[in-house]
Image (spheres, rainbow, N blue to C red):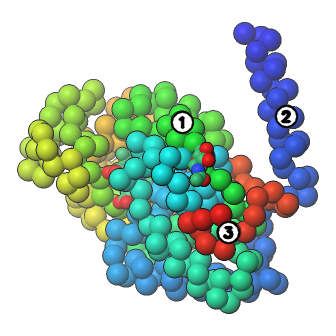
Amino acid sequence: MKISSNHYYYFATLAILLIVPSDAQLSSTFYDDTCPNALSTIRASIRQAVNNEQRMAASLIRLHFHDCFVQGCDASILLENGSGERAASLNANSIRGFEVVEAAKQAVEAICPGVVSCADVLAMAARDATVAVGGPSWTVKLGRRDSPAAATRALAENDLPCVTDRLQTLIAKFAKKNLNESDMLALSGSRTIGQARCVTFRDRIYGKGNERIDPEFAMARRRNCPESGGDENLVPLDEVTPNGFDNNYFRNLYNMRGLLESDQVLFSRVLTDSIVLEYIDNPDRFYSDFAAAMIKMGDIEPLTGGAGLIRRTCASNN
Ligand code: HEM
Ligand SMILES: *[C@@H]1O[C@H](CO)[C@@H](O)[C@H](O)[C@H]1NC(C)=O
Ligand SMILES: *[C@@H]1O[C@H](CO)[C@@H](O)[C@H](O)[C@H]1NC(C)=O
Protein backbone atom coordinates (compact mmCIF):
# COMPACT_ATOMS: atom_id res chain seq x y z
CA MET A 1 0.00 0.00 0.00
CA LYS A 2 2.66 2.43 1.11
CA ILE A 3 4.97 1.56 -1.74
CA SER A 4 2.30 1.85 -4.41
CA SER A 5 1.17 5.25 -3.17
CA ASN A 6 4.78 6.46 -3.15
CA HIS A 7 5.08 5.28 -6.72
CA TYR A 8 1.89 7.06 -7.54
CA TYR A 9 3.23 10.40 -6.27
CA TYR A 10 6.53 9.85 -8.00
CA PHE A 11 4.90 9.24 -11.36
CA ALA A 12 2.30 11.97 -10.87
CA THR A 13 5.04 14.50 -10.14
CA LEU A 14 7.07 13.29 -13.08
CA ALA A 15 4.05 13.55 -15.37
CA ILE A 16 3.36 17.11 -14.22
CA LEU A 17 6.97 18.11 -14.81
CA LEU A 18 6.90 16.59 -18.26
CA ILE A 19 3.62 17.92 -19.60
CA VAL A 20 3.22 21.36 -18.02
CA PRO A 21 5.78 23.93 -19.09
CA SER A 22 6.60 26.05 -16.05
CA ASP A 23 5.57 29.34 -17.65
CA ALA A 24 2.20 28.05 -18.78
CA GLN A 25 -0.71 29.76 -17.06
CA LEU A 26 -4.20 30.48 -18.24
CA SER A 27 -5.00 34.19 -18.33
CA SER A 28 -8.10 36.23 -19.07
CA THR A 29 -6.09 38.56 -21.33
CA PHE A 30 -4.58 35.78 -23.45
CA TYR A 31 -6.13 36.97 -26.76
CA ASP A 32 -6.03 40.71 -26.07
CA ASP A 33 -3.28 41.26 -28.64
CA THR A 34 -3.80 38.35 -31.01
CA CYS A 35 -7.59 38.41 -31.35
CA PRO A 36 -9.17 41.28 -29.40
CA ASN A 37 -12.63 40.65 -30.84
CA ALA A 38 -12.70 36.94 -30.04
CA LEU A 39 -14.80 37.33 -26.91
CA SER A 40 -17.50 39.53 -28.43
CA THR A 41 -17.65 37.37 -31.57
CA ILE A 42 -18.20 34.21 -29.53
CA ARG A 43 -20.73 35.91 -27.27
CA ALA A 44 -22.84 37.04 -30.25
CA SER A 45 -22.76 33.56 -31.75
CA ILE A 46 -23.76 31.84 -28.49
CA ARG A 47 -26.50 34.36 -27.72
CA GLN A 48 -28.06 33.71 -31.08
CA ALA A 49 -27.93 29.94 -30.60
CA VAL A 50 -29.56 30.19 -27.17
CA ASN A 51 -32.21 32.53 -28.56
CA ASN A 52 -33.00 29.91 -31.16
CA GLU A 53 -33.21 27.16 -28.57
CA GLN A 54 -33.18 27.82 -24.82
CA ARG A 55 -32.07 24.29 -23.94
CA MET A 56 -28.82 24.89 -25.77
CA ALA A 57 -27.56 26.87 -22.74
CA ALA A 58 -27.75 23.72 -20.62
CA SER A 59 -26.21 21.57 -23.30
CA LEU A 60 -23.18 23.86 -23.65
CA ILE A 61 -22.51 23.95 -19.91
CA ARG A 62 -22.63 20.16 -19.83
CA LEU A 63 -20.45 19.82 -22.93
CA HIS A 64 -17.73 21.90 -21.25
CA PHE A 65 -18.06 19.76 -18.10
CA HIS A 66 -17.74 16.49 -20.03
CA ASP A 67 -14.76 17.90 -21.92
CA CYS A 68 -12.92 18.99 -18.76
CA PHE A 69 -13.56 15.81 -16.74
CA VAL A 70 -12.07 13.52 -19.37
CA GLN A 71 -8.40 14.21 -20.13
CA GLY A 72 -8.76 17.89 -19.17
CA CYS A 73 -10.31 20.94 -20.89
CA ASP A 74 -8.77 20.21 -24.28
CA ALA A 75 -11.78 20.08 -26.64
CA SER A 76 -11.09 16.38 -27.15
CA ILE A 77 -14.81 15.70 -26.82
CA LEU A 78 -15.46 17.76 -29.95
CA LEU A 79 -13.46 15.45 -32.18
CA GLU A 80 -15.60 13.22 -34.32
CA ASN A 81 -14.41 9.83 -33.30
CA GLY A 82 -17.00 7.09 -33.14
CA SER A 83 -14.93 4.88 -30.86
CA GLY A 84 -13.43 7.44 -28.44
CA GLU A 85 -14.92 9.28 -25.46
CA ARG A 86 -18.05 10.28 -27.38
CA ALA A 87 -19.06 6.64 -27.55
CA ALA A 88 -19.09 6.37 -23.74
CA SER A 89 -22.52 5.52 -22.36
CA LEU A 90 -22.72 8.88 -20.55
CA ASN A 91 -22.04 10.79 -23.78
CA ALA A 92 -23.60 8.79 -26.61
CA ASN A 93 -27.06 10.05 -27.54
CA SER A 94 -26.79 12.52 -24.70
CA ILE A 95 -24.29 15.36 -25.06
CA ARG A 96 -25.13 17.99 -27.64
CA GLY A 97 -24.18 21.45 -28.87
CA PHE A 98 -21.36 20.46 -31.21
CA GLU A 99 -22.64 22.48 -34.16
CA VAL A 100 -23.10 25.56 -31.96
CA VAL A 101 -19.48 25.43 -30.75
CA GLU A 102 -18.29 24.84 -34.31
CA ALA A 103 -20.26 27.86 -35.56
CA ALA A 104 -18.73 30.09 -32.85
CA LYS A 105 -15.27 28.73 -33.67
CA GLN A 106 -15.75 29.41 -37.40
CA ALA A 107 -16.91 32.96 -36.62
CA VAL A 108 -13.61 33.48 -34.76
CA GLU A 109 -11.59 31.73 -37.48
CA ALA A 110 -13.02 34.26 -39.94
CA ILE A 111 -11.48 37.18 -38.00
CA CYS A 112 -8.27 35.57 -36.64
CA PRO A 113 -7.47 32.25 -38.29
CA GLY A 114 -5.58 29.65 -36.28
CA VAL A 115 -5.42 31.67 -33.06
CA VAL A 116 -8.25 30.73 -30.70
CA SER A 117 -8.48 27.13 -29.52
CA CYS A 118 -11.67 25.09 -29.53
CA ALA A 119 -11.12 24.42 -25.82
CA ASP A 120 -11.26 28.17 -25.13
CA VAL A 121 -14.26 28.65 -27.42
CA LEU A 122 -16.08 25.97 -25.42
CA ALA A 123 -15.12 27.54 -22.06
CA MET A 124 -16.42 30.92 -23.24
CA ALA A 125 -19.53 29.33 -24.73
CA ALA A 126 -20.42 27.82 -21.34
CA ARG A 127 -20.12 31.21 -19.66
CA ASP A 128 -22.00 33.12 -22.38
CA ALA A 129 -24.75 30.48 -22.36
CA THR A 130 -25.14 30.80 -18.58
CA VAL A 131 -25.48 34.56 -18.86
CA ALA A 132 -27.96 34.23 -21.74
CA VAL A 133 -30.44 32.38 -19.50
CA GLY A 134 -30.09 34.74 -16.56
CA GLY A 135 -27.23 33.09 -14.67
CA PRO A 136 -24.10 34.66 -13.21
CA SER A 137 -21.12 35.82 -15.24
CA TRP A 138 -17.43 35.29 -14.60
CA THR A 139 -14.10 36.06 -16.20
CA VAL A 140 -13.00 33.09 -18.29
CA LYS A 141 -9.32 32.21 -18.14
CA LEU A 142 -7.87 31.53 -21.59
CA GLY A 143 -4.87 30.04 -23.33
CA ARG A 144 -5.87 26.38 -23.46
CA ARG A 145 -4.73 24.44 -26.49
CA ASP A 146 -6.54 21.60 -28.22
CA SER A 147 -5.87 17.91 -28.04
CA PRO A 148 -4.83 16.17 -31.26
CA ALA A 149 -6.80 13.07 -30.22
CA ALA A 150 -9.99 12.02 -28.51
CA ALA A 151 -9.77 10.41 -25.10
CA THR A 152 -10.71 6.77 -24.87
CA ARG A 153 -14.16 5.56 -24.13
CA ALA A 154 -12.80 3.73 -21.07
CA LEU A 155 -11.36 6.93 -19.58
CA ALA A 156 -14.70 8.72 -20.02
CA GLU A 157 -16.55 5.86 -18.37
CA ASN A 158 -14.12 5.90 -15.49
CA ASP A 159 -14.00 9.65 -14.83
CA LEU A 160 -17.52 10.93 -15.56
CA PRO A 161 -20.06 10.67 -12.74
CA CYS A 162 -23.08 8.36 -13.23
CA VAL A 163 -26.67 8.66 -12.06
CA THR A 164 -26.28 5.53 -9.97
CA ASP A 165 -23.12 6.68 -8.14
CA ARG A 166 -23.41 6.93 -4.36
CA LEU A 167 -22.63 10.25 -2.74
CA GLN A 168 -19.13 9.19 -1.65
CA THR A 169 -18.32 8.08 -5.20
CA LEU A 170 -19.49 11.42 -6.60
CA ILE A 171 -17.42 13.30 -4.03
CA ALA A 172 -14.36 11.19 -4.92
CA LYS A 173 -14.78 11.72 -8.68
CA PHE A 174 -14.93 15.49 -8.19
CA ALA A 175 -12.06 15.49 -5.69
CA LYS A 176 -9.94 13.76 -8.32
CA LYS A 177 -10.49 16.87 -10.47
CA ASN A 178 -9.67 19.23 -7.61
CA LEU A 179 -13.33 20.11 -7.01
CA ASN A 180 -14.74 19.90 -3.49
CA GLU A 181 -18.25 19.26 -2.21
CA SER A 182 -19.52 22.81 -2.50
CA ASP A 183 -18.07 23.00 -6.04
CA MET A 184 -19.93 19.81 -6.93
CA LEU A 185 -23.19 21.07 -5.48
CA ALA A 186 -22.91 24.48 -7.10
CA LEU A 187 -22.09 22.98 -10.51
CA SER A 188 -24.96 20.51 -10.21
CA GLY A 189 -27.19 23.56 -9.63
CA SER A 190 -26.93 24.20 -13.37
CA ARG A 191 -29.41 21.34 -13.71
CA THR A 192 -31.94 24.07 -12.95
CA ILE A 193 -32.05 24.25 -16.75
CA GLY A 194 -31.93 21.57 -19.40
CA GLN A 195 -33.55 18.20 -19.87
CA ALA A 196 -33.01 14.55 -19.21
CA ARG A 197 -34.04 11.41 -21.05
CA CYS A 198 -36.47 8.95 -19.54
CA VAL A 199 -33.82 6.22 -19.53
CA THR A 200 -31.78 8.25 -17.00
CA PHE A 201 -34.53 8.52 -14.35
CA ARG A 202 -36.92 5.62 -15.00
CA ASP A 203 -35.76 3.48 -12.08
CA ARG A 204 -36.17 6.39 -9.70
CA ILE A 205 -39.78 7.18 -10.62
CA TYR A 206 -40.80 3.52 -10.60
CA GLY A 207 -39.61 3.00 -7.04
CA LYS A 208 -36.38 1.21 -7.89
CA GLY A 209 -34.05 3.93 -6.63
CA ASN A 210 -32.52 4.26 -3.19
CA GLU A 211 -33.41 7.90 -2.60
CA ARG A 212 -36.70 9.36 -1.38
CA ILE A 213 -39.09 10.77 -3.97
CA ASP A 214 -42.27 12.83 -3.67
CA PRO A 215 -44.99 10.34 -4.78
CA GLU A 216 -47.00 12.98 -6.63
CA PHE A 217 -43.89 14.02 -8.53
CA ALA A 218 -43.13 10.39 -9.41
CA MET A 219 -46.67 9.87 -10.73
CA ALA A 220 -46.52 13.02 -12.85
CA ARG A 221 -43.17 12.02 -14.33
CA ARG A 222 -44.44 8.55 -15.25
CA ARG A 223 -46.74 10.17 -17.80
CA ASN A 224 -43.75 11.05 -20.00
CA CYS A 225 -41.69 8.03 -19.10
CA PRO A 226 -43.36 4.63 -19.40
CA GLU A 227 -42.03 1.61 -17.54
CA SER A 228 -40.77 0.23 -20.82
CA GLY A 229 -40.13 2.06 -24.07
CA GLY A 230 -39.81 5.81 -24.54
CA ASP A 231 -36.17 5.83 -23.46
CA GLU A 232 -35.47 9.04 -25.35
CA ASN A 233 -38.49 11.00 -24.05
CA LEU A 234 -37.31 14.31 -22.62
CA VAL A 235 -38.35 15.89 -19.35
CA PRO A 236 -37.16 19.22 -17.93
CA LEU A 237 -34.77 18.80 -15.01
CA ASP A 238 -36.53 21.67 -13.21
CA GLU A 239 -40.25 21.52 -13.89
CA VAL A 240 -40.90 24.92 -12.23
CA THR A 241 -38.63 27.19 -14.29
CA PRO A 242 -37.16 24.85 -16.94
CA ASN A 243 -35.35 27.55 -18.93
CA GLY A 244 -34.32 30.03 -16.25
CA PHE A 245 -31.06 29.88 -14.32
CA ASP A 246 -32.07 30.18 -10.66
CA ASN A 247 -31.62 28.27 -7.39
CA ASN A 248 -34.74 26.20 -7.86
CA TYR A 249 -32.71 23.02 -8.34
CA PHE A 250 -31.95 23.05 -4.62
CA ARG A 251 -35.57 23.71 -3.67
CA ASN A 252 -36.53 20.66 -5.76
CA LEU A 253 -34.02 18.54 -3.84
CA TYR A 254 -35.45 19.79 -0.55
CA ASN A 255 -38.93 18.78 -1.75
CA MET A 256 -37.70 15.31 -2.83
CA ARG A 257 -38.36 16.31 -6.42
CA GLY A 258 -34.89 15.85 -7.83
CA LEU A 259 -35.38 14.14 -11.18
CA LEU A 260 -32.23 12.03 -11.21
CA GLU A 261 -31.13 9.64 -8.50
CA SER A 262 -27.81 11.52 -8.50
CA ASP A 263 -29.70 14.77 -7.86
CA GLN A 264 -31.57 13.51 -4.83
CA VAL A 265 -28.52 11.80 -3.34
CA LEU A 266 -27.08 15.30 -2.82
CA PHE A 267 -29.86 15.99 -0.29
CA SER A 268 -30.46 12.95 1.81
CA ARG A 269 -27.18 12.46 3.54
CA VAL A 270 -26.09 14.75 6.33
CA LEU A 271 -22.87 15.48 4.47
CA THR A 272 -24.06 17.90 1.79
CA ASP A 273 -27.51 18.87 3.08
CA SER A 274 -26.22 22.07 4.67
CA ILE A 275 -24.89 23.25 1.30
CA VAL A 276 -28.30 22.67 -0.31
CA LEU A 277 -30.00 24.68 2.47
CA GLU A 278 -27.44 27.46 2.08
CA TYR A 279 -28.12 27.74 -1.67
CA ILE A 280 -31.90 27.82 -1.05
CA ASP A 281 -31.56 30.64 1.50
CA ASN A 282 -28.89 32.55 -0.31
CA PRO A 283 -29.16 32.51 -4.11
CA ASP A 284 -26.34 35.04 -4.44
CA ARG A 285 -24.06 32.61 -2.67
CA PHE A 286 -25.08 29.92 -5.18
CA TYR A 287 -24.32 32.24 -8.09
CA SER A 288 -20.90 33.25 -6.82
CA ASP A 289 -19.99 29.67 -5.88
CA PHE A 290 -21.19 28.46 -9.29
CA ALA A 291 -19.03 31.04 -11.07
CA ALA A 292 -16.00 30.17 -8.93
CA ALA A 293 -16.53 26.44 -9.49
CA MET A 294 -16.82 26.92 -13.27
CA ILE A 295 -13.45 28.71 -13.22
CA LYS A 296 -11.97 25.86 -11.17
CA MET A 297 -13.45 23.31 -13.57
CA GLY A 298 -11.98 25.22 -16.51
CA ASP A 299 -8.56 24.80 -14.90
CA ILE A 300 -8.58 21.01 -15.12
CA GLU A 301 -5.40 19.81 -16.86
CA PRO A 302 -5.27 22.32 -19.72
CA LEU A 303 -2.78 21.91 -22.55
CA THR A 304 -0.70 25.09 -22.61
CA GLY A 305 2.48 26.52 -24.08
CA GLY A 306 3.78 24.20 -26.79
CA ALA A 307 1.51 21.27 -25.95
CA GLY A 308 -1.36 20.31 -28.25
CA LEU A 309 -2.40 22.54 -31.13
CA ILE A 310 -4.98 25.06 -32.32
CA ARG A 311 -7.44 23.04 -34.36
CA ARG A 312 -8.93 24.83 -37.37
CA THR A 313 -12.17 22.91 -37.05
CA CYS A 314 -13.30 21.54 -33.73
CA ALA A 315 -14.58 18.31 -35.21
CA SER A 316 -11.27 17.21 -36.71
CA ASN A 317 -7.55 17.29 -36.16
CA ASN A 318 -6.64 19.87 -38.86
C1 HEM B 1 -22.80 15.11 -9.88
C2 HEM B 1 -22.61 14.28 -10.90
C3 HEM B 1 -23.43 14.38 -12.15
C4 HEM B 1 -24.22 13.41 -12.70
C5 HEM B 1 -24.38 11.98 -12.18
C6 HEM B 1 -24.88 13.98 -13.84
C7 HEM B 1 -25.76 13.32 -14.67
C8 HEM B 1 -26.56 13.90 -15.63
C9 HEM B 1 -27.50 13.19 -16.46
C10 HEM B 1 -27.76 11.69 -16.41
C11 HEM B 1 -28.12 14.10 -17.26
C12 HEM B 1 -29.19 13.81 -18.31
C13 HEM B 1 -28.50 13.31 -19.56
C14 HEM B 1 -29.43 12.66 -20.57
O1 HEM B 1 -30.64 12.72 -20.42
O2 HEM B 1 -28.91 12.10 -21.53
C15 HEM B 1 -27.54 15.39 -16.96
C16 HEM B 1 -27.89 16.57 -17.56
C17 HEM B 1 -27.29 17.79 -17.31
N1 HEM B 1 -26.20 18.01 -16.46
FE1 HEM B 1 -25.38 16.67 -15.19
N2 HEM B 1 -24.47 15.28 -13.98
C18 HEM B 1 -23.58 15.57 -12.98
C19 HEM B 1 -22.89 16.76 -12.82
C20 HEM B 1 -23.09 17.89 -13.57
C21 HEM B 1 -22.24 19.06 -13.54
C22 HEM B 1 -20.98 19.19 -12.71
C23 HEM B 1 -22.78 19.95 -14.43
C24 HEM B 1 -22.31 21.34 -14.80
C25 HEM B 1 -21.04 21.73 -14.76
C26 HEM B 1 -23.96 19.35 -14.99
C27 HEM B 1 -24.82 19.94 -15.90
C28 HEM B 1 -25.88 19.32 -16.53
C29 HEM B 1 -26.80 20.02 -17.41
C30 HEM B 1 -26.79 21.51 -17.69
C31 HEM B 1 -27.68 19.05 -17.93
C32 HEM B 1 -28.79 19.25 -18.97
C33 HEM B 1 -28.16 19.11 -20.36
C34 HEM B 1 -29.09 19.30 -21.54
O3 HEM B 1 -30.26 19.63 -21.40
O4 HEM B 1 -28.58 19.12 -22.68
N3 HEM B 1 -24.10 18.10 -14.47
N4 HEM B 1 -26.58 15.24 -15.96
C1 LIG C 1 -10.38 7.54 -31.75
O1 LIG C 1 -10.02 7.62 -30.38
C2 LIG C 1 -9.35 6.49 -29.87
C3 LIG C 1 -9.14 6.71 -28.39
O2 LIG C 1 -8.33 7.82 -28.15
C4 LIG C 1 -8.03 6.28 -30.65
O3 LIG C 1 -7.40 5.11 -30.17
C5 LIG C 1 -8.33 6.16 -32.13
O4 LIG C 1 -7.12 6.09 -32.85
C6 LIG C 1 -9.15 7.36 -32.61
N1 LIG C 1 -9.54 7.17 -34.01
C7 LIG C 1 -9.41 8.13 -34.92
C8 LIG C 1 -9.91 7.82 -36.28
O5 LIG C 1 -8.90 9.22 -34.66
C1 LIG D 1 -14.24 24.48 -1.80
O1 LIG D 1 -13.20 25.24 -2.36
C2 LIG D 1 -13.45 26.65 -2.38
C3 LIG D 1 -12.25 27.34 -3.02
O2 LIG D 1 -11.92 26.77 -4.24
C4 LIG D 1 -13.64 27.17 -0.97
O3 LIG D 1 -13.97 28.55 -1.00
C5 LIG D 1 -14.77 26.39 -0.29
O4 LIG D 1 -14.89 26.80 1.06
C6 LIG D 1 -14.48 24.90 -0.34
N1 LIG D 1 -15.63 24.17 0.20
C7 LIG D 1 -15.50 23.12 1.00
C8 LIG D 1 -16.76 22.43 1.44
O5 LIG D 1 -14.41 22.69 1.35
Residue occupied by mark 1: 154
Where disc 3 sits, the SS reads loop
Residue 245 spot, x, y in % from top left: 39, 66
**In this view of the protein, which residue sits in the foreground, 285 or 218?**
218
Amino acid type, label 1: Ala
Q: Quadrant of the N terminus?
A: top right
Residue under the point 40% across and 73% down: 133
Q: Nearer the viewer, mark 1 or mark 2?
A: 1
Lower sequence index among marks 1 and 3:
1
Q: Which residue is mark 2?
A: 13
CA gap between label 1 and label 3 equals: 25 Å
Amino acid carrying label 3: it is Asn
Please report whichever mark, 3 or 2, sits nearer to the chain's N-terminal start. Answer: 2
- Report the residue marked by disc 3: 318
Beta carbon at label 2 within 8 Å of ligand 3: no
Q: Residue type at mark 2: give it.
A: Thr
Query: Reading the chain from its start, which is encountered first: label 1 or label 2?
Result: 2
Eyeballing the image, is 36 above or below 210?
below
Q: Nearer the viewer, residue 237 or 83?
A: 83
Asked whether residue 316 appears in the rendered view, the answer is yes
Q: Looking at this view, is 287 or 116 the one in front?
A: 116
Name the secondary structure under disc 1: helix
Residue 186: % across, % down? 49, 51
Residue at the spot 35% in from the left edge and 81% down from the top edge: 52
What residue is rendered at 35% in x and 42% in y? 263
Q: Residue at x 37, y 53 (%)?
A: 94
- With respect to residue 129, does 43 lie above or below? below
The answer to whether 94 appears left or right of 178 in the picture is left
The crowd level at tag 3 (other Cα within 10 Å; few <14, some 14-19, many 20+) is few
Q: Can I make out residue 64 in this image?
A: no
Count of marks placed on residues = 3
Numbered mark located on residue 137 in the image: none
